[in-house]
Amino acid sequence: MFKIGETVICIDARRRWYKLDGLKINEMYTISGFNPYDDGLILREIKSPRSGCKAYAADRFRKVDYAFADRIISDLQPKSLPKRKIKFNFKRRRFQR
């Protein structure tokens, strides 16, 4: 489901009894590896000291929806404005519209 180097978003930042907290909800993290025992995510930005492999459960995260972000950005960008044509008169050395 997840890949190394992929960016994920935290959707469950509650403290769990078997691992320390430290996650922040809606924060983005980069996957640097996987726990070989339970496929937990090892994150580049934060470590879980109580876990043997310093991993967080995968169900705490979701993938980033880049298509949605691209649509939002394209909607916010202004539409292209019509360009005006400008000619230069070399004899008079003046701009004309």
Image (cartoon, rainbow, N blue to C red):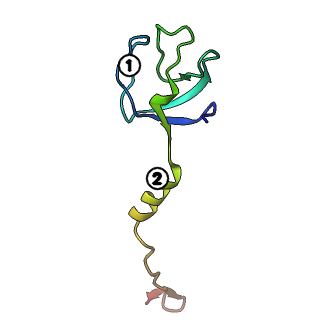
Distance (Cα) linking label 1 and label 2: 26 Å
- State the residue in front, 69 or 83: 69
The numbered mark at residue 69 is 2
Image coordinates of residue 42 in percent, x first then y, are: 55, 21
The numbered mark at residue 56 is none
Task: Tell me what residue is drawn at x 46 percent, y 20 percent.
Answer: 46
- State the residue in front, 11 or 82: 11
Q: Is residue 20 left or right of residue 65?
A: left
- State the residue in front, 54 or 70: 54
The numbered mark at residue 22 is 1
Q: Give the mark nearest the N terminus, 1 or 2.
A: 1
Image coordinates of residue 84 in percent, x first then y, are: 45, 84
Q: Is residue 86 above or below residue 33?
A: below
What kind of element bears circle 2? helix
Q: Splitting the image into 4 quarters, where does residue 20 fall?
A: top left
What kind of element bears circle 1? loop
Task: Tell me what residue is drawn at x 55 percent, y 21 percent.
Answer: 40
Task: Tell me what residue is drawn at x 44 percent, y 58 percent.
Answer: 73
Number of other residues with Cα within 10 Å of mark 2, as a class: few under 14, some 14 to 19, many 20 or more: few
- Callout 2 amino acid: Ala
